[in-house]
Image (cartoon, grey):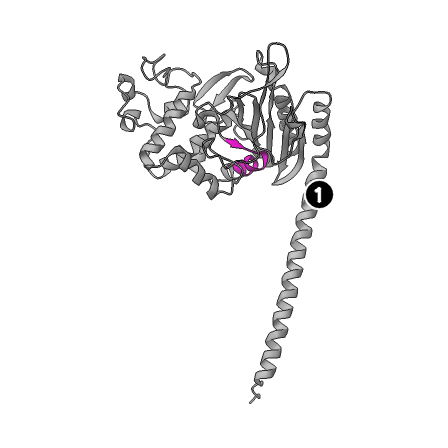
Amino acid sequence: MQPVPSLQNRTRISSQKSVWRKKFNVLILTFILISVQTYGQKKQAEYADLALKIDSILNGQKFNGVILVSADATDVYAKAIGFSDLENKTKMDLNDQFVVGSISKQITAVLVLREYEKTTIGLNDAIESYLPEIHQPWAKEVTIHHLLTHTHGIVALDKPLEFKPGSQFQYSQLGYELLAQILEKVTGKSFEQLSTALFDNYGLKSTFHPNNKNYKHLVKGYEENENGILVFAPNSIENYAAAGSFISNVTDLKKWNEALYSGQLLTKETLTLMKTKYATRIHPVFETVAYGYGLLFKDGEQNIQIGALGYAPGFVSACYYYPQENVNLIILENTANHLTDFKKTFKIHTEIMKLVKKQTNKHSS
């Protein structure tokens, strides 16, 4: 029979085990940190050529904003260029916040689709079911789906439809405002409360409904006037929040993409619905483009390049995802030039998008 260790010996053995456990945990943590760092360096090396090409596009151009490219969650290009306040020459920072324009629509679409998953909203339900105060015959015809896809034909709440629901595409800010009102009806909460809860739940600490004044780093937006001079745009957040006035930064939009496309925000089946082509849009920048629920893509390119451009007075944005290589591209600019020709306004954004698309296709082939 083995002797029972004394209390003193048992204490010493337990202490030794604790020390070795701590040393082992430190070794594991060190190994993980080294592995992550090495992987990050490898990713940055893979995309070094892309970074040089982006710099080449920016060279000599009038870009004022922030650009972030990430691959597998590793930032392979991150730059803040110019000023957040042109008058005071305040340098731009990577954490600065911007009004993201129509990128807001995918946030609203996700809020609607999360209620669809709870069965509190039906995509084919007529809006009369939710907004009985609209006393128009078309309230019995227009559905949630029509509002999400800009195929409803509503031009004003007191006017007839422009066309039969589902027969045409006509870009509409009002349609997304109606979606916000429907969300308020079915949840009993304000749209600000709903969006704020979503952002809080997924760690989007720099993303805000414009009525939530907790944002601290919103840059000033500027528009080029008829004399070619950039002037402050005071009405940047006067659009419907659900359609185009959310505030965010590049880091949070990267997190948003990662959460959306990895299936954290929606089920796989609902995300597929969101990425399905429902209409063809004649776009001022892309010419012909497919439209899902708040998301744009070239026909058949849902798994190549998907996302949205955004415009608000003084703010020009792009938020895109490249599924083949798990790459995110976020471009936020606070100077809007060439407003008579949006192709020129978004020229830097679309040129960088082409570069990233070519790079991800090359890696996948």
Looking at the image, which residue is at 63% across and 24% down?
A: 354
What count of labels does the image hold?
Answer: 1
Looking at the image, which residue is at 68% across and 40% down?
A: 43
Image side of residue 120 versus residue 293, left or right: left
Q: Position of residue 170 (x, y in %)?
A: 43, 16
Quarter of the N terminus within the rendering:
bottom right
Q: Is 256 colored magenta in this rendering?
A: yes
Q: Position of residue 130 (x, y in %)?
A: 29, 29
Is residue 245 or residue 8 the one in the foreground? Answer: 245
Query: Which kind of residue does numbered mark 1 sit on?
Result: Gln
Residue carrying label 1: 41
Looking at the image, which residue is at 66% across and 48% down?
A: 36
Q: Is residue 304 visible?
A: no
Q: Is residue 124 visible?
A: yes
Q: Secondary structure at mark 1?
A: helix
Looking at the image, which residue is at 43% across and 40% down?
A: 197
Image side of residue 234 versus residue 154, left or right: right
Q: Magenta stretch?
A: 247-258
Quadrant position of residue 317: top right
Q: Position of residue 115 (x, y in %)?
A: 36, 36
Quadrant position of residue 141: top left
Instruction: Specify the principal SS of the magenta part.
Output: helix
Image side of residue 320 versus residue 126, left or right: right
The residue lying furthest to the front in this view is 88
Q: Position of residue 207 (x, y in %)?
A: 51, 36
The residue lying furthest to the top in this view is 226
Is residue 236 or residue 246 the one in the foreground? Answer: 236
Quadrant position of residue 189: top left
Q: Is 198 colored magenta in this rendering?
A: no
Mark 1 neighbour density, 10 Å: few (under 14) some (14–19) many (20 or more): some
Quarter of the C terminus within the rendering:
top right
